[in-house]
């Protein structure tokens, strides 16, 4: 079917509306396109710790403030029980904490800052008079000894030939930068000490610069702050500003910035101040933690006139959602579309449908490699825990709880080794065990119990790939900006999701799975099976009935369809002991979960050797082993929906000799696919040692194609290979006549009449004495039968469907 025919009205409507609104938006506000880029910001974090013992304390420090060069965005403060006040003045914004607490103070902010450069006219003279408010910046201080004769003597030795403003500042800057060696100093270094030692840190160089500038009549002040570089550190920084024609022009004699300041300088205060002051003898300590980060500008810039109406991030900001979380939230629909595309078009398998989306969202906070490592760690721990706790016969829910506890302990140990992490990172990492285990533990359990290592590897690889792709989408600045500025584009995402939901083509993985029969162009894929047959021909209540095997048997019996006898049932732990004790009365039997699928949870006992039960594969089990297995069934470990289930017993049927002569390793069955009473395809499923006596292909049984007309076995499929002989018994597989063939076809059609699913799979076995009987019906029969038959049946299904 062509792409044009695949398009349907809902997807077209959503696409047209979305494209129309998007076009109007581009026309109305074309400047929004320029905002799709990233903005370089810094995450600034300050942590102050102390030991207050039993006394009240006072701690002060200067906090970032917004001015014409820098902007403080999204501040947050954690200070426990301490009383906090904000004292803002011309010097700066000082935070003051008072009270009793031993909880560290944590301040966090996102800083946006830009570079500033100034051009100084070479012909500009030094002014001789300034307004009164500037004269304080010409006066001497304790550490800026303007009037000391040694400062004047120094100036006489370094002064330029022409006394202009620019040449004077160049002479001062060249001397303090080139002649004074930069070196770390603890404490305060004044201008005179710096001149004498010819060594100083940033504050000593800046004070000497200020002293020489003030001597020449240039108002100069110190500025304190922090250099924003990605690191954890304790060092702050100081530079100077000179007043020139109405502007405070920056100079940094330590790092050689003349009349300019780079973008990563954060200003905290003005004047010769101490950055921290606090109560004495409290073991005060502090640390700056700075990270550089590119953030989508529209997640932060939505308070201007242009674009405020259309910016979806602004709505989230109003209710207190942080910008990073807002970016993830806006991309959830798009990432969900990626997962839908990967699963329904590519056929990628993952642990859980949307689990990769949740894990990748957490990776945005923890970092990709830490998050991916957490996922792999949880996966391995869950697997090892599953193996360990299975040996001790833990039931499903306690076992999952124990595995979650094991994972949490693992992460605590990792935190202890790695050291401190930000509270947000630790919080997100702690959620990993709970989030992931809830999606993967049960499926992981089934794979390990079935020794299905290939499926485990493919699913694990698919999960890692999808986590990586989802992370790339979540971390895309362009995508975050686009969906923030153009929320109407979500209509296009909706259109794409609807299109994929109604697309019935083969998945890419199915081209590989059915590569031997795809040349016939008649292969039925999962998408088409689900949409055109399961959803259209099978009522939901009938699908639920087919899942409930006990109720299905009752309905079939009422319509005269033969089914195995139900010997006993147990749906609660109250009756468990009596149920298990009843098993002693049977020489052989089969225990089944009522709502199981794909053969999971079926226990075949071929012999009761005085209380020791022998399985079809020869494994010997005690009564306690069987009790544990029944407990697993009751708790829902094998149920399709994971809900509590019912265990029931059937007699072990004696397979008809015409079938058992192939291999007497378990009960074989015949799968008959029907659509509206027409038989579409048939196969005989023969157990092997690998399948442990179960007639299930994915567990290692052999599939033999059966000719619908004659009932002869014609072709064989075993793990993707063609065989002529049984791998265990050595018996010939092809050319066998299925006994009671016409009756089997009649029973299959009667079963469909009794359970009127339009598309159905009927599983029939042949007992030596009782003849053909229906084991179960399936409202979503698998498609591997096409490989067994070496031909697809999409066309036959369409013909049968259209006969309604």
Image (cartoon, grey):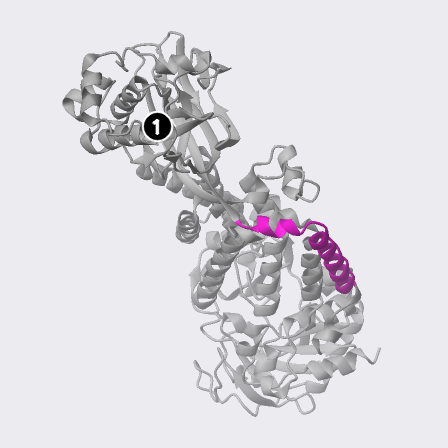
Mark 1 crowd level (few <14, some 14–19, many ≥20, 10 Å Cα): many
Up-down relation of residue 119 to residue 360 (above or below): above
Q: What residue appears at the point 52 percent right and 87 percent down from the top-left corner?
A: 733
In the figure, is residue 498 to the left or right of 727? right
Q: Residue furthest left?
A: 197
Image quadrant occupied by the N terminus: bottom right
In the figure, is residue 529 to the left or right of 392? right
Q: Which quadrant of the structure image shows residue 106? A: top left
Magenta residues (range):
10-37
Residue 446 drawn at (x, y percent): 50, 59
Residue labelled with disc 1: 165
Q: Nearer the viewer, residue 634 or 782?
A: 782
Main SS of the magenta part reads: helix
Residue at disc 1, secondary structure: helix
Q: Nearer the viewer, residue 546 or 626?
A: 546
Up-down relation of residue 446 to residue 191 (above or below): below
């Amino acid at each position: 079917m062509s792409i044009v025919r695949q398009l349907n009205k809902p997807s077209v409507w959503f696409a047209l509306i979305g494209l129309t609104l998007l076009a109007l938006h581009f026309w109305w506000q074309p400047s929004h396109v320029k905002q799709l880029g990233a903005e370089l910001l810094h995450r600034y974090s300050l942590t102050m710790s102390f030991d207050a013992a039993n006394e009240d304390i006072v701690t002060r420090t200067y906090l970032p403030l917004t001015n014409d060069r820098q902007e403080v965005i999204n501040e947050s403060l954690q200070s426990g029980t301490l009383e906090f006040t904000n004292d803002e003045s011309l010097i700066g914004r000082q935070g003051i904490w008072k009270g009793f607490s031993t909880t560290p103070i944590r301040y966090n902010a996102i800083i946006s800052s830009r570079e500033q450069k100034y051009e100084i006219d070479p012909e500009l003279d030094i002014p001789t008079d300034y307004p009164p408010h500037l004269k304080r910046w010409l006066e001497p201080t304790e550490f800026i000894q303007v009037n000391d004769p040694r400062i004047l003597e120094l100036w006489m030795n370094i002064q330029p030939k022409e006394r202009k403003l620019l040449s004077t500042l160049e002479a001062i800057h060249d001397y303090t930068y080139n002649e004074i060696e930069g070196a770390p100093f603890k404490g305060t270094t004044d201008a005179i000490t710096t001149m004498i030692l010819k060594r100083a840190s940033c504050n000593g160089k800046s004070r000497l610069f200020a002293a020489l500038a003030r001597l020449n009549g240039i108002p100069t002040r110190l500025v304190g702050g922090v250099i924003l570089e990605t690191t954890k550190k304790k060092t702050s920084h100081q530079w100077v500003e000179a007043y020139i024609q109405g502007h405070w022009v920056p100079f940094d004699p330590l790092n050689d910035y003349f009349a300019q300041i780079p973008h990563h300088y954060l200003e905290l205060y003005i004047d010769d101040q101490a950055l921290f002051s606090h109560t004495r003898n409290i073991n005060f300590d502090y640390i700056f933690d700075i990270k550089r980060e590119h953030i989508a500008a529209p997640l932060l810039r939505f308070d201007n006139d242009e674009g405020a109406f259309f910016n979806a991030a602004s709505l989230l900001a109003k209710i207190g959602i942080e910008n990073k979380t807002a970016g993830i939230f806006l991309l959830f629909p798009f990432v969900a579309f990626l997962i839908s595309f990967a699963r329904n078009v590519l056929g990628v398998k993952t642990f859980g449908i949307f689990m990769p989306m949740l894990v990748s969202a957490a990776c945005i906070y923890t970092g990709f490699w830490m998050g991916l490592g957490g996922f792999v760690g949880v996966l391995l721990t869950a697997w090892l825990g599953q193996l360990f706790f299975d040996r001790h016969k833990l039931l499903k829910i306690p076992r999952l709880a124990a595995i979650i506890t094991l994972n949490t302990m693992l992460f605590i140990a990792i935190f202890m080794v790695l050291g401190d992490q930000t509270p947000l990172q630790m919080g997100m990492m702690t959620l990993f065990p709970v989030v992931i285990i809830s999606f993967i533990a049960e499926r992981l359990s089934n794979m390990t119990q079935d020794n299905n290592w290939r499926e485990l590897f493919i699913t694990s690889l698919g999960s890692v790939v999808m986590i990586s792709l989802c992370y790339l989408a979540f971390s895309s600045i362009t995508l975050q900006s686009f969906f923030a500025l153009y929320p109407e584009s979500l209509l296009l995402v909706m259109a794409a999701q609807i299109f994929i939901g109604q697309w019935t083509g083969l998945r890419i993985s199915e081209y590989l799975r059915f590569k031997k029969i795809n040349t016939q162009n008649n292969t039925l894929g999962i998408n088409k099976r689900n949409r055109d047959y399961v959803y259209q021909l099978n009522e939901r209540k009938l699908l639920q009935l087919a899942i409930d095997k006990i109720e299905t048997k009752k309905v079939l019996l009422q319509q005269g369809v033969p089914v195995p006898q139900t010997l006993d049932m147990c749906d609660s732990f109250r009756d468990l002991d009596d149920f298990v004790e009843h098993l002693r009365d049977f020489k052989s039997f089969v225990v089944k979960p009522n709502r199981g699928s794909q053969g999971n949870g079926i226990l075949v006992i071929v012999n009761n050797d005085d209380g020791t039960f022998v399985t079809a594969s020869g494994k010997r089990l005690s009564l306690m082993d069987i009790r544990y297995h029944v407990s697993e069934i009751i708790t829902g470990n094998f149920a399709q929906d994971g809900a509590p289930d019912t265990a029931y017993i059937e007699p072990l049927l004696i397979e008809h000799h015409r079938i058992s002569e192939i291999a007497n390793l378990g009960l074989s069955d015949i799968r008959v696919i029907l659509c509206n009473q027409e038989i579409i395809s048939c196969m005989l499923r023969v157990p092997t040692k690998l399948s442990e006596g179960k007639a299930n292909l994915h567990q290692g049984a052999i599939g033999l194609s059966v000719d619908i007309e004659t009932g002869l076995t014609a072709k064989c499929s075993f793990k993707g290979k063609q065989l002529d002989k049984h791998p265990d018994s050595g018996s010939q597989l092809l050319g066998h006549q299925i006994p009671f063939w016409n009756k089997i076809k009649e029973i299959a059609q009667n079963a469909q009449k009794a359970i009127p699913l339009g598309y159905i799979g009927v599983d029939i076995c042949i007992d030596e004495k009782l003849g053909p009987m229906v084991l179960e019906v399936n409202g979503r029969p698998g498609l591997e039968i096409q490989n067994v038959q070496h031909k697809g049946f999409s066309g036959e299904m369409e013909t049968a469907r259209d006969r309604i």
